[in-house]
Image: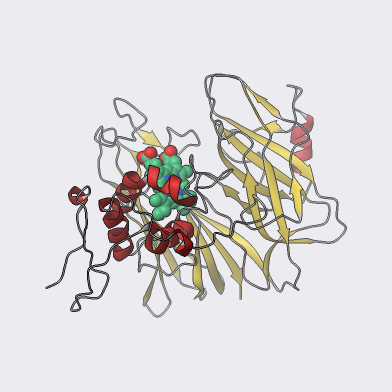
Amino acid sequence: MVRQPLVLGAIGLSCIGIALGGINTTKPVKKVNYAEHVAPILNRSCVPCHRPNEVAPFSLIGYDNAKKWARMIAKVSDSRLMPPWKAEHGYGEFQDENRLTNSEIATLKAWVGTGAERGDKKKEPKLVLPASDWTLGQPDMIVSPSKAFKLDAEGDDVYRNFVIKTNSDQPIWVKAMDVHPGNRKVVHHVIVFVDNNGMSDKLAAKTTDGQEGYVSQGGGVGFLPSGALGGWAPGLRPIMNAQGTAFKVNPGARLVVQVHYHKSGKPEEDLTKVGLYVAKEPIDKEIHLAWIMNFGLNIPAGESDYKIARNYKVPTDVTLRFVLPHMHLLGRKMEAHVVLPDGSEKPLIKVNDWDFNWQLMYAYKEPIKIPKGSTIVVNAQYDNSANNLRNPNSPPKRVTWGEQTTDEMFLLVAGYTRD
Ligand code: HEC
């Protein structure tokens, strides 16, 4: 007989057996404890965010914290709210997929059933925390505006572009970028653009409010940027790009750090910092970003199943390295695949439960070769009905493309190198 992993309703019973094995084996009933069974799961999958100075609001380091949160841990793991990982398993293979197995979820639930037993303290795994509060370690360069930006209490969202000079007479090859928002109450997201032509300086020179940088409308930077290094939104974790690949920042280029501010109701200040990791090895492939968009979004009020797609013909042989889906609050699903010239298809990403709070970047385990003439197909689905609890408009109204959180977007950012 196979014991089924227990459903949530069983939490609270003591002494719960769980099926840890495959389908036809019945493993002996095992007493679950923190030291041997729970700590390894939490340390690996939760503590990277649930520790001091990280994105999560409380720490899950050590037995006392874990015990305090035991019920919630089981609950949010079971519903797969945590750890936040929105890509459907098996549709594309990604690095660092942070997803609990069914038996790990069963373990967490069974642990609650034991009254959150500690087990043998000496068996608790040693937790090694990074020496730096930057996820990838201390950056080679940290850039930021020279002083905090002052934001009014109320009004529309603000897109402020801070212009930062790079002082290098050689190209800077950026392997990874990380952003530390200064004030999480108001920083909605951050994108770092590259300007090789001094356009941003001209715009900043026109600013009259006495603060650094300049305001742009519609989410762009007010000119066609030379490139972008990526961005930050809640939950986004930086990735180190593959050996021999990096973003290029030309000598004398400006970095334009665009911070999207959402006002909090009180005057606030923010000083956002950008950490750059510079290549130590020779770089032979520059990383580019493709922005696959559909501006044609036009979602009727009340429409619960609005579908829209974009087919993007790939103009040259490329290797796809990572993707980042982006929608706002009405977005429910996004799926992308590539149709190769021989007609065969490869999955790229599928998010069935889009959550605006988790704008994750997904890097492929094996980069995907995409020959010239292939078509990347992106499908998205939106729910503009009153039943969508995240719908920012009450009652619902017609929504089109736009930069405010109450507008919508259809965007798949794809990071690639040319072959
Ligand atoms: C990528 C970062 C990240 C990871 C990994 C992560 N969390 Fe979280 N967690 C958060 C953030 C941020 C919040 C606050 C979310 C919010 O306010 O929406 C949160 C909230 C929670 C909450 C409170 C939920 C609520 O409704 O109040 C629990 C419980 C939790 N996490 C447990 C876990 C567990 C258990 C794991 C590992 C299995 C985990 N988290 C992994 C970032 C993370």
Q: Residue at x 44, y 65 (%)?
A: 376
Q: Which residue is drawn at 69% across and 42% down?
A: 273
Residue 356 seen from this side: no
Image coordinates of residue 138 in percent, x first then y, are: 71, 55
Question: In which quadrant is the C terminus drawn?
Answer: bottom right
Residue situated in front as seen by the camera: 36 or 173: 36
Residue situated in front as seen by the camera: 305 or 400: 305
Report whether 359 appears left or right of 180. left
Report whether 322 appears left or right of 79. right
Image coordinates of residue 23 in percent, x first then y, are: 20, 75
Residue 54 seen from this side: yes
Q: In which quarter of the image is residue 392?
A: top left
Residue situated in front as seen by the camera: 126 or 89: 126
Residue situated in front as seen by the camera: 6 or 407: 6
Residue furthest left in the image: 1
Image coordinates of residue 65 in percent, x first then y, are: 45, 45
Image coordinates of residue 415 in percent, x first then y, are: 56, 62
Q: Residue at x 53, y 47 (%)?
A: 51
